[in-house]
Image: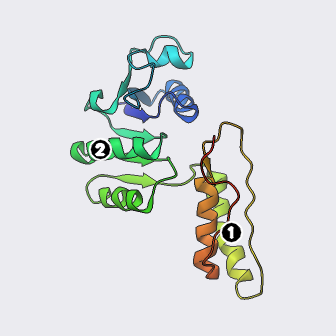
Amino acid sequence: MRTIVGVNGAAGRMGQRLIHLIGEDNDLALGAALEAADHPRLGQDIGEIVGLGKLGVPLACASDWPQRLDVLIDFSTPQGTMTVLPLCVERRIPLVVATTGHTAEQRSEIEAAAHHTALLMAPNMSLSVNVLFQLVRQAALLLKDKGFDVEIVERHHRFKKDAPSGTALHFARIVQEVMGQTQLRHGREGLVG
């Protein structure tokens, strides 16, 4: 039996990559491809949009998605997450939130949803970055109270929308938590891509 996956942010860079990966995995089936209600390609077949040929799954907005999904993966925008969140809670559809840039209030609402449906939220889905999160925690423990300043430098492709990235902010939160740092300063901030 195949796992039916929905992708929110399906026409974006990561969404398109997920569509390709779902198509390559015999244990997965694409059940929904979602985008913002004002997306110019709504109604078009997502397979044609991503270069796979017709898949029979139209690009749709959240209010038009089918109920039958085993999981929804969100690689959209903070507003996109907040659009699908109540639907996942209502329908008890597990949600993977890979979107970053949420406000503290939005993060609280997402965390509260975990009481009603399965939820995984991470600032980065890469195994190697998650290992690095643990290594940074170890380094912060070893450097705590020894007079060190911490600087996080990140570099992304020109299409990166948010700055600092959710990954960089998570590194900063780890350092703050372990070393007691209270102030963050960064050069670029907001939706800059």
Q: Amino acid at mark 2?
A: Cys
Judging by the rendered image, the residue that carries numbered circle 2 is 88
At horizontal 60% and vertical 42% (from top left) the residue drawn is: 161
Residue most toward the left? 90
At horizontal 27% and vertical 42% (from top left) the residue drawn is: 87
Question: What colouring does the structure picture have?
Answer: rainbow
Placement of 187 over or under 49, stated as above or below = below
Q: What SS does tag 1 mark? A: helix
**Position of the N terminus by quadrant:** top left
Q: Amino acid at mark 1?
A: Val
Percent x, y of residue 135: 69, 67
Judging by the rendered image, the residue that carries numbered circle 1 is 136
**Circle 1: is it few (<14), some (14-19), or many (20+) Cα within 10 Å?**
some
Which of the 4 image quarters holds residue 67? top left
**Circle 2: is it few (<14), some (14-19), or many (20+) Cα within 10 Å?**
many
The answer to which of marks 2 and 1 sits earlier in the sequence is 2
